[in-house]
Amino acid sequence: MYIYEFVVRCFHSIDIFELLYQTFYICYSLAVTACRRASGLVLLQGGIVLAEKPTVMAVQKALESAKKRNFTETVELAINLKDIDLSIPKNRIQEDVILPAGRGKKIKICVIGGGELALKAKDVADLVITPEELGALAENKKQAKKIANSTTYFIAEAPLMAVVGKRLGTVLGPRGKMPKPIPPGVDPANMVESLRKSVTVRTKDRKTFHVPVGSVDMSADDIAENVEIILKRVALRLEKGKMNIASAYVKTSMGPSERIL
């Protein structure tokens, strides 16, 4: 099953168009947002204008009510769905969304490839796994799981997708961390940069799911922009749009929640 998914993703070009679309949209959105600040509105995808002030206020309250920790807490968006059967695979959501204000924390990205790609990846990725190292890693399940748990995104050289699926599919697949294909020799810098600002929205078969939308070091305005983007993208993937969203809350990883919807 995992090998099939790898091969499909390798030839499925919509990911590229999706990335271009999101990049264009974010640049456009940020420019318009500056003009909308005075009226307390923000322009989202499709030209739909949503009130920003309530979201900003909820985020601000969540930040203020969180206790000071000796580490940087993540700010999460909890979404509860309704009137949707997630036991049906086509109703589930799994997609990457680029956050306009970024994640507020550095995440680990691993590139799997050899030759020119591996050389270029060493300057931008946190970990590079060569084809020669892949076999040894597959045999060391403990190490493979450790890397999978500590790494947010994987990128693999397109010709290696089937091999990666066969050797690491049982580790990466259940965690929703199937590598994203990249052509041999291509500079991975742009892809890595985009992924560092991205989050994965993944429902699995549960109606309640969480998505990171920033960190406590970020401003309430920036986190609110990220929240609005996620809510918009989730609504676009639901059959009844926002009508399938029962509620949404924002909170720090260890703090109390504040309702947004």
Image (cartoon, helix red, strand yellow):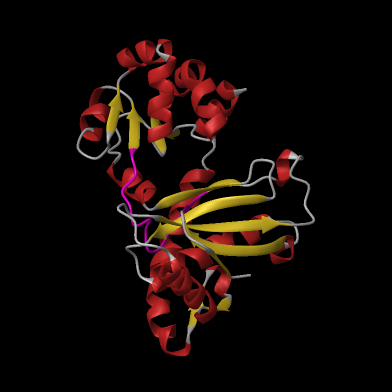
Residue in the picture at 42% in, 62% down: 24
Quadrant for the C terminus in the image: bottom right
Q: Residue 188 appears in which quarter of the rendering?
A: top left
Nearer-the-camera pick, 129 or 4? 129
On the question of residue 215 being in view, the answer is yes
Q: Position of residue 81 (x, y in %)?
A: 70, 56
Quadrant location of the N terminus in the rendered image: top right
Would residue 9 be found to the left or right of residue 20 on screen? right
| Residue 64 horizontal/vertical position (percent) | 41, 71
Bounds of the magenta segment? 96-108
Q: Position of residue 93 (x, y in %)?
A: 63, 47
- Residue 92 painted magenta: no
Chief SS of the magenta region? loop
Q: Which quadrant of the view contains residue 63?
A: bottom left
For residue 28, what is the image quadrant? bottom left
Task: Determine the residue positioned at 58% across, 75% down.
Answer: 48
Q: Position of residue 230 (x, y in %)?
A: 54, 60
- Look at the image and tell me whether residue 182 can be seen: no
Foreground: 13 or 181? 181
- In the image, 70 versus 3, the foreground residue is 70
Which residue appears at 25% of the width and 34% of the height?
121
